[in-house]
């Protein structure tokens, strides 16, 4: 095996391990503060420690893992201020994407978003996050701003485990579904101002409610 082939294999293994760990963290299977032992993970994923270390670095960059100096890796705690920043940025960038997209939206693209929403309402909590993102991106894609969409995707990844917590503990799914229906109607009317205002409130209301819930759990200083 050549050096380049070996490096590619290690990189592929790191991505595989990172994807699996990300899902475990986002779903709550791995709890905030839980230790992530490299030796144990290497055995679990049947790989060497190098891909595991690289995977943990990838997840550290996403804010899902913390690796303090001279200490082992842990699942990053749920931080209300971190999530506040995420949803504030989402509200700004996603309303921009929608404002740019609406003049380009076709009826078939709106129908595709509606079909995703139908599936979300018929699905279970486990699939809520993925379908929620798919719905939003179906409306944003016509903005034709790849860098903007990439930033929104990264913010969605950072906020995914928070969104799942909101869905599970705040009975958020019912409200989210209705707000998505209202947003679809505004898009069908090509009412950009109304659609962007609905979207802003949709993101901020859920964010504020979850920040309040998370803050209430923190011990007093």
Image: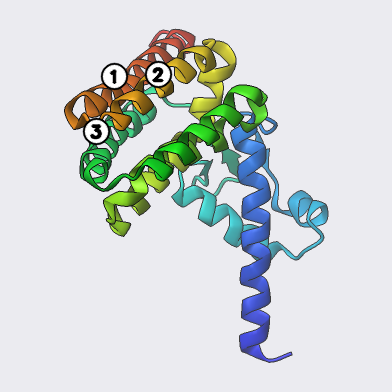
**Picture coordinates of residue 98 (x, y %)?**
27, 39
Reading the image, the residue beneath label 2 is: 179
Q: Tag 2's secondary structure?
A: helix
- Colour scheme shown: rainbow
The residue positioned 21% from the left and 39% from the top of the image is 99
Which of these two is toward me, 56 or 19? 19
The residue positioned 60% from the left and 31% from the top of the image is 119
Frontmost of labels 1 and 2 is 2
Marks 2 and 3, Cα distance to the nearest angstrom? 16 Å
Q: Are marks 1 and 2 in contact (CB under 8 Å)?
A: yes
Say the numbered circle drawn on residue 201. Answer: 1
Classify mark 2: residues with Cα within 10 Å, few (<14), some (14-19) or many (20+): some
Image quarter where the N terminus lies is bottom right
Q: Earlier in the sequence, mark 1 or mark 2?
A: 2
Marks 3 and 1, Cα distance to the nearest angstrom? 18 Å
Which of these two is toward me, 161 or 110? 110
**Picture coordinates of residue 209 (x, y %)?**
39, 12
The residue positioned 68% from the left and 75% from the top of the image is 9
Regarding residue 40, the answer to whether it shows in the image is yes
Q: Tag 1's secondary structure?
A: helix
Say the numbered circle drawn on residue 190. Answer: 3
The residue positioned 33% from the left and 29% from the top of the image is 87
**Picture coordinates of residue 173 (x, y %)?**
53, 17
Q: Is residue 205 left or right of residue 190?
A: right
Say the numbered circle drawn on residue 213. Answer: none
Regarding residue 77, the answer to whether it shows in the image is no
Q: Is residue 99 left or right of residue 147?
A: left
Which of these two is toward me, 57 or 35? 57
């Amino acid at each position: 095996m050549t050096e380049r082939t070996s490096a590619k294999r290690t990189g592929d293994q790191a991505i595989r391990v990172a994807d699996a760990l990300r899902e475990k963290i986002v779903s709550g299977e791995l709890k905030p503060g839980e230790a992530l032992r490299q030796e144990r993970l290497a055995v679990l994923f049947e790989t060497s420690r190098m891909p595991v270390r690289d995977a943990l670095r990838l997840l550290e960059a996403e804010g899902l893992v913390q690796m303090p100096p001279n200490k082992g890796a842990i699942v990053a705690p749920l931080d209300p201020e971190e999530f506040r920043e995420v949803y504030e940025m989402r509200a700004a960038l996603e309303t921009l994407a929608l404002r740019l997209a609406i003049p380009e939206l076709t009826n078939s693209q709106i129908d595709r978003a509606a079909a995703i929403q139908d599936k979300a309402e018929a699905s279970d909590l486990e699939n809520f996050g993925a379908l929620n993102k798919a719905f939003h991106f179906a409306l944003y894609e016509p903005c034709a701003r790849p860098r903007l969409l990439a930033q929104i995707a990264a913010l969605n990844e950072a906020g995914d485990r928070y969104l799942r917590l909101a869905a599970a503990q705040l009975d958020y799914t019912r409200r989210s579904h209705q707000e998505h229906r209202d947003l679809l109607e505004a898009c069908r009317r090509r009412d950009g101002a109304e659609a962007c205002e609905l979207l802003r409130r949709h993101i901020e209301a859920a964010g504020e409610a979850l920040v309040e819930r998370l803050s209430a759990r923190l011990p007093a200083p």
